[in-house]
């Protein structure tokens, strides 16, 4: 503000203003007005602060601002945002609990929004500088914890949190392994109660704002707010932090092991470390090598400040995507800043590498010991055999786990009564595991850890006492909600052309244990295959295997004609039915669903919006009793495979009486976030009721003109827009995967709830039963999912140069039985003499390039590639080839430039095309007429020599595919490509600067 005044008022910097006295009076009046405004605002803020302090139990009386330098008190809070405001005194409600969210909750302070991604309130202890923190640590009840806080003062731990159960995970982290670190930053939602985050001994910062509601779990869009945090006076981020460690809310960190690792690293501007993501189970198409956030991303402070700089990586910060693309986008940003992913041992290791049960050997203990160490079974977390996170949280030995029956009554249990939730409560013996030796290169982090296991790991690594761990595990278990399986209904958007096949496939595989399952199709098609009841909500008889013949549902509120025991037995039986929809179009034999009548002007996506609305109406409004008794609505495509037990475990973490709308969010710039329908959409009863109230609004009209400008305009986007209009915010949950595992590597998807893109449910069912034991995966393959199948991206490209043996090399490679040829040897897709600056998009690469290669699956163990000699000289080729195929191997064959030039000249003489290369290209066009008037080779060489001399330096000359300035053009510095292409170093420099050296091979052709 002072700088702005100096610009408006010259006399503020010692210069007299120009103009007469009237201008001077106006300026003085303007300044006086500003001063009065600031006085008024300051007075109001003071009054508000006093009022808030009284309303929140004196919390704000313990608040101090870092810039004031007030000496710290026993309990304090740092406000990093001047817009911070206290929330209501009532905190988040947990089962049976009001008031505090858990043991030790002292109050509530949340940051206000500062625009998109604005800074929220920063919580915590070390205000007043390092001296104040040192003073506070002298009174810490745990000397070892105080010592660890001091040791960790140069590391900022950054946790990606959020609403709902994500908040529970963060709280567990802050009270387990992160309780003894100096600096913690949490990406979270501004609506959350953060009283539990408070601590007098550490600094906790919150990044929250409007952008979070629009794009949760896309922290790349919040980097500008992080930059503002860096710029704040007295911020530890500027004073002492040398490393930033970014983790998800499911990452366990052995803090001591991390500090040992960090102490051996140099804080360079290119420090980017962790577990490099495997292409087999993370985003690969269109991304460079990057560090997997599940194992933790370690960045030096110099590199982090460049990433957060508003001028850096705008395309990655603004681009759409999902949470599981965040670390990939961060990797792209880091790549273009000149850094490369550096693997570190011990990041993202298996859980059994940390702790073993008493009596088990630290190594070589066999599968049984490994299963004990991981809390149940090697695949327990996978939950494909019917085990969910609750079961996985308990030890497999019956004597070491206390199982409790679910409490009676409709009211949720109190936070202190974990047994009443029906969740297994681990006994003290579960916390008695011992840490494995953790020397240099030992285990550091574990990814995808549920809260109970996170507590156990914190205990066995010495970061948490057994008593505190038992209390924390009981508190976490109490955050879950009782849920009967019959309260969940799964709704399938079935293709009209394949109804019978879809029903048979689901009924024999994943649908078997589901109590309520509905297949939604047009009424006419449904009636062709099944008897359908009359009325608005037509429905079929029960299709479940043990259903009574002709068993139709009863109306909501209709008295049962059966006795109570029979009714209870009927309620426990699965109810699988075909739900008949009234859709606006007539049937057709074309297309997967019904083809839209073009005379009505209705597009394919418009019809999908109508169908999604009809499915939603049926699931929420139909008068059948079994539908009205639903608490959770799950919508999936017919090529989605649902894992029932993990789905139930996920839903037990959320209260259906609160509006919840989650899955795998998708984002389109400028439009509301929505949950992608493929992998599954979850709505609570409260959310469904809110959406139903606005269903007839203009925002929920499938024919609204706004859809004409959208890229995403199908049924899932329609539901997302309605949710936004109803005030139901989109959230992200783990486990909703847009495609099945590569080569059935299910061990990499232990958190899975549903897989989309499963065309063959029976094959998936069999693979899950085998738990991927027969999986075979070619590590050279970078898979891309197309048409319900995984195909490998091209493995290699021979990029140059012409007349240097590229054709011969390609033919030699094709003689190998495991090398498969492309459609043509020279595809010239990425660039050639006519298009030296081709910038293809993702869709163009998919449709025009990848389709020209054979379809090689990851289990075929074969490779393919192409050979286009002109790629070496292409200006945009390195960027765009690496953008879409970051692991491709590049081969360049070189040859003595003199015989190479003469060989190419002779080739062009035969083709009668020499003349077209003697003049520069204009607007990416070349003279294409054939001519026999080719000058002798000697005169061409002499012309090049004269040109290089007249231009003053060979480096000022340019050839066919080079960039050139107007000055170079006017000076006549063009040289023909016969000679120009022989300056290899000029072109290789760009490739070697961008491509990792291990991916480049240069061969000499003689």
Image (cartoon, helix red, strand yellow):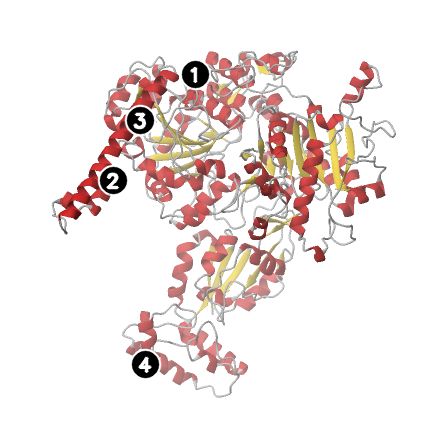
Q: Nearer the viewer, residue 361 or 914?
A: 914
Vertically, is 881 above or below 15? below
Q: Which residue is mark 1?
A: 105
- Work out which residue is located at the far bottom of the displayed protein and give it: 933
Q: Which residue is mark 2?
A: 1
Cα distance between the residues tagged 3 and 4: 77 Å
Image coords of residue 148 (percent x, y): 35, 22
Cα distance between the residues tagged 1 and 2: 38 Å
Vertically, is 493 above or below 793? above
Q: Nearer the viewer, mark 1 or mark 4?
A: 1
Cα distance between the residues tagged 1 and 3: 26 Å
Answer yes or no: do the residues labelled 2 and 4 have beta carbons within 8 Å? no
Q: Which residue is mark 4?
A: 946
Residue 781 visible: no
Q: Nearer the viewer, mark 2 or mark 4?
A: 2
Q: Quadrant of residue 826?
A: bottom right
Q: Residues within 10 Å of mark 4 (few under 14, many from 20)?
A: few
Helix, strand or loop status at disc 1? loop
Answer yes or no: do the residues labelled 3 and 4 have beta carbons within 8 Å? no
| Residue 45 numbered tag | 3
């Amino acid at each position: 503000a002072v700088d702005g005044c100096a610009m408006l008022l010259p006399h503020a910097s010692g210069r007299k203003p120009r103009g007469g006295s009237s201008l001077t009076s106006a300026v003085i009046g303007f300044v006086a007005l500003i001063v009065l405004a600031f006085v008024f605002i300051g007075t109001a803020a003071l009054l508000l602060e006093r009022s808030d302090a009284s309303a929140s139990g004196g919390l704000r009386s313990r608040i101090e601002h870092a810039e004031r330098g007030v000496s710290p008190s026993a309990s304090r809070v740092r406000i990093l945002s001047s817009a911070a405001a206290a929330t209501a005194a009532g905190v988040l409600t947990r089962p049976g609990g009001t008031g505090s969210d858990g043991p030790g909750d002292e109050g509530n302070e949340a940051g206000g929004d500062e625009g998109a991604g604005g800074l929220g309130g920063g919580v915590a202890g070390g205000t007043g500088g390092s001296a104040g923190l040192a003073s506070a640590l002298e009174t810490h009840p745990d000397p070892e914890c105080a010592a660890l806080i001091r040791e960790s003062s140069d590391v900022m731990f950054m946790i990606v949190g959020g609403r709902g159960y994500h908040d529970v995970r963060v709280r567990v982290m802050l009270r387990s392994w992160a309780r003894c670190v100096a600096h913690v930053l949490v990406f979270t939602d501004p609506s959350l109660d953060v009283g539990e985050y408070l601590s007098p001994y550490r600094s906790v910062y919150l990044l929250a704002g409007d952008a979070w509601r629009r794009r949760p779990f896309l922290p790349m869009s919040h980097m500008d707010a992080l930059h503002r945090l860096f710029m704040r006076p007295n911020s530890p981020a500027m004073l002492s932090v040398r490393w930033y460690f970014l983790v998800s809310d499911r990452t366990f960190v052995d803090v001591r092991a991390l500090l040992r690792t960090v102490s051996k690293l140099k804080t360079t501007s290119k420090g980017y470390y962790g577990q490099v993501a495997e292409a087999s189970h993370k985003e690969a198409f269109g991304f460079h090598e990057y560090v997997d956030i599940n194992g933790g991303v370690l960045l030096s402070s110099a590199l982090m400040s460049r990433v957060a700089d508003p001028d850096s990586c705008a395309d990655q910060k603004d681009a759409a995507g999902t949470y599981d693309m965040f670390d990939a986008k961060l990797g792209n940003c880091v790549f273009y800043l000149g850094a490369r992913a550096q693997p570190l041992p011990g990041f993202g290791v298996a859980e059994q590498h940390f702790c073993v049960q008493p009596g088990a050997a630290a190594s070589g203990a066999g599968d049984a010991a490994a299963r004990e160490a991981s809390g149940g079974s090697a695949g327990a977390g996978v939950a494909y055999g019917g085990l969910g996170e609750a079961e996985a949280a308990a030890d497999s030995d019956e004597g070491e786990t206390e199982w409790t029956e679910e409490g009676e009554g409709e009211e949720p249990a109190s936070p202190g009564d974990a047994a009443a939730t029906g969740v297994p409560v681990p006994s003290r013996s579960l916390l008695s595991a011992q840490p494995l030796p953790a020397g240099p290169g030992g285990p550091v982090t574990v990814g995808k850890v549920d809260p109970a296991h996170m507590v156990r790991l914190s205990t066995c690594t010495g970061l948490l006492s057994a008593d505190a761990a038992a209390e924390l595990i009981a508190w976490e278990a109490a955050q879950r909600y009782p849920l009967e399986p019959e309260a969940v209904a799964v709704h399938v958007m079935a293709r009209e052309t394949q109804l019978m096949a879809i029903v048979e496939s689901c009924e024999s595989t994943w649908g078997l244990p589901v109590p309520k399952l509905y297949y939604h199709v047009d009424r006419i098609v449904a009636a062709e295959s099944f008897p359908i009841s009359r009325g608005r909500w037509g429905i079929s008889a029960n299709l479940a295997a043990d259903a009574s013949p002709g068993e139709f549902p009863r109306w909501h509120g209709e008295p049962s004609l059966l006795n109570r025991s029979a009714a209870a037995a009927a309620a426990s039986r699965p109810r699988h039915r075909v739900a008949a929809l009234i859709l606006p179009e007539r049937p057709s034999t074309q297309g997967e669903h019904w083809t839209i009548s073009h005379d009505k002007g209705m597009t394919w996506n418009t019809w999908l919006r109508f169908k999604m609305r009809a499915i939603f109406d049926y699931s929420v409004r139909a008068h059948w009793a079994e539908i009205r008794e639903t608490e959770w609505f799950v919508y999936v495509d017919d090529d989605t495979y649902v894992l029932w037990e993990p789905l139930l475990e996920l839903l037990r973490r959320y209260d259906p009486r609160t509006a919840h709308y989650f899955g795998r969010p998708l984002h389109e710039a400028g439009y509301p976030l929505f949950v992608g329908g493929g992998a599954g959409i979850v709505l609570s009863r409260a959310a469904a009721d809110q959406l139903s109230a606005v269903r007839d609004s203009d925002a929920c009209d499938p024919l609204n003109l706004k859809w004409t400008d959208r890229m995403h305009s199908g049924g899932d986007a329609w539901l997302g827009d309605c949710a936004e209009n109803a005030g139901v915010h989109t959230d992200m949950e783990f486990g909703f995967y847009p495609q099945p595992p590569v080569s059935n590597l299910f061990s990499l998807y232990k958190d899975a709830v549903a897989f989309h893109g499963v065309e063959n449910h029976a094959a998936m069912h069999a693979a899950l039963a085998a738990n991927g034991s027969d999986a075979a995966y070619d590590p050279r393959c970078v898979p891309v999912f197309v048409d319900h199948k995984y195909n490998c991206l091209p493995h290699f490209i021979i990029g140059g140069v012409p007349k240097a043996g590229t054709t011969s090399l390609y033919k030699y490679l094709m003689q190998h039985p495991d090398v498969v040829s492309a459609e043509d040897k020279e595809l010239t897709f990425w660039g050639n003499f006519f298009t030296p600056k081709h910038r293809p998009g993702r869709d163009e690469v998919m449709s025009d390039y990848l389709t020209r290669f054979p379809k090689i699956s990851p289990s075929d163990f074969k490779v393919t590639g192409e050979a286009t000699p002109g790629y070496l000289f292409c200006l945009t080729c390195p960027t765009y080839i690496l953008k879409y195929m970051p692991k491709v191997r590049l081969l360049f064959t070189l040859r003595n430039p003199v015989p190479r030039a003469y060989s190419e000249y002779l080739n062009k003489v035969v083709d009668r095309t020499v003349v077209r290369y003697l003049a520069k290209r204009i607007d990416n066009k070349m003279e294409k007429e054939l001519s026999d008037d080719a000058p002798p080779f000697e005169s061409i060489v002499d012309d090049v020599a004269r040109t290089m001399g007249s231009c003053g330096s060979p480096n000022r000359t340019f050839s066919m595919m080079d960039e050139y300035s107007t000055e170079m053009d006017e000076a006549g510095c063009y040289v023909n490509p016969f000679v120009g292409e022989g300056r290899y170093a000029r072109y290789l420099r760009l490739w070697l600067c961008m491509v990792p050296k291990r991916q480049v091979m240069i061969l000499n052709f003689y």
